[in-house]
Amino acid sequence: MKSAVPNKTTYYFDDDLAGFGLYRTTTGTGTYFAEFRPVAGGSKKRLKLGRVGTLKANEAREAARKAIANAALGKDLAQNRSDERASLTVEELVSK
């Protein structure tokens, strides 16, 4: 018998490392993430670390540990990624 596919994304959190977990989408894709609250306050942020199968659980846990530690030190890796995506590419810079 085939197991039922959930009709919404399901989140699973690690028992040992607060803020680390994975989520499974309705298609079955699993993605590891780190969840943290910036030192300056505000809402929680969730940083995608990588897909299940591409990234091993222990590698994802270590990446989450670093992301959560950086957040505790005032560094926001999620914001850094967002800033990098918004920055100009070399091609865009040269074409100006």
Image: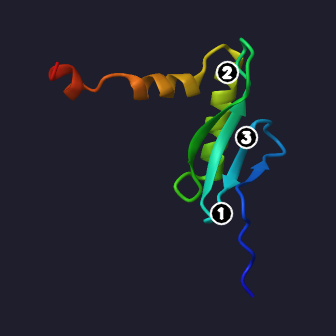
Q: CA distance from mark 2 to mark 1?
A: 30 Å
Location of residue 42 by image quarter: top right
Crowd around label 2: few <14 · some 14–19 · many ≥20 (10 Å) = many
Residue 20 disc label? 3
Between discs 2 and 3, the one toward the N terminus? 3
Q: Position of residue 48 (x, y in %)?
A: 59, 41
Q: Secondary structure at mark 2?
A: helix
Q: Secondary structure at mark 3?
A: strand
Residue shown at 71% from the left, 34% from the top:
35
Q: Position of residue 31 (x, y in %)?
A: 61, 51
Q: Secondary structure at mark 1?
A: loop
- Looking at the image, which is closer to me, 54 or 77? 77
Q: Position of residue 96 (x, y in %)?
A: 17, 18
Residue 26 disc label? 1
Which residue is farthest right? Answer: 15
Measured along the vertical axis of the image, is residue 22 above or below residue 26? above
Asked if the residue at tag 1 contacts the one at tag 3, i.e. Cβ–Cβ closer than 8 Å, the answer is no
Q: CA distance from mark 2 to mark 3?
A: 13 Å
Left or right side of 93 for 66: right
For marks 3 and 1, give the one nearer the viewer: 1
Between discs 3 and 1, the one toward the N terminus? 3
Question: What is the three-letter code of the residue carrying label 1?
Answer: Thr
Measured along the vertical axis of the image, is residue 90 above or below residue 15? above
Measured along the vertical axis of the image, is residue 13 above or below residue 67? below
For marks 2 and 1, give the one nearer the viewer: 1
Q: Which residue is mark 2?
A: 71
